[in-house]
Amino acid sequence: MPSPLSSFNCKYSRECSECCLETEMALSEEDLERIQNHGYKKNAFTRNVDGFLILKNIGKNCYFLKEGKCSIYEIRPQGCRLYPMIVDFESNSIVIDKSCPSHEQFEVNEYSHLFYDLVNFVDLLLSEKDEREKKEKK
Ligand code: SF4
């Protein structure tokens, strides 16, 4: 049973694609399955980077960005729903991406539950990466 997907309620919603350019968004197995169930082939929209499944770009655009809009908005990956909260691997912390035009709308108090969702999501990505690497070694 898939887990419910939490989302930041972006005021620009489908009108902005700032977060869909040169994406490095990591996908969970659940994201992968949900998108594949809509007829997309894994190799067409993912790349493997250090064991993580990452969305592919076509040129500078996410594979799914078509005519400036996400073509899979209703089934988009969990990480896309949690943006502008991102993991800054340099400081090893969760930050709000200031390049998002909506970042000032992001009230930490209102969206504190998303902080925990992102922490759990990162744990999930790391454990799935480990599993993937174990399978590849067999
Ligand atoms: S899947 Fe959709 S929301 Fe996520 S980066 Fe791609 S186009 Fe943007």
Image (cartoon, rainbow, N blue to C red):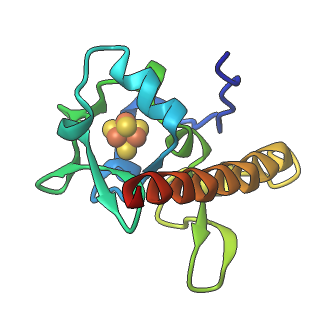
Along the viewing direction, whichever of 32 and 127 lies nearer the viewer: 127
Q: Is residue 49 above or below residue 108?
A: below
Q: Is residue 52 above or below residue 114?
A: below
Which quadrant of the view contains residue 23?
bottom left
| Residue 12 seen in this snapshot | no
Which residue is located at x 50 percent, y 43 percent? 80
Give the number of marks.
0
Q: Is residue 80 left or right of residue 57?
A: right
Q: Is residue 15 above or below residue 86?
A: above
Residue 9 at x, y percent in the picture: 64, 33
Report the residue that reaches farthest toward the left: 59
Which residue is located at x 66 percent, y 68 percent? 95
Residue 92 at x, y percent in the picture: 66, 79
Quadrant position of the N terminus in the picture: top right
Which quadrant of the view contains residue 108?
bottom right
Rendered-image quarter of ligand 1: top left
Which residue is located at x 55 percent, y 59 percent? 130
Report the residue that reaches farthest toward the right: 109
Along the viewing direction, whichever of 76 and 8 lies nearer the viewer: 76
Q: Is residue 63 left or right of residue 128?
A: left
Report the residue that reaches farthest toward the front: 138
Which residue is located at x 29 percent, y 31 percent? 69
Q: Is residue 99 left or right of residue 136?
A: right
Along the viewing direction, whichever of 132 and 116 lies nearer the viewer: 132
| Residue 39 seen in this snapshot | yes
Quadrant position of the C terminus in the picture: bottom left
Residue 12 at x, y percent in the picture: 49, 36
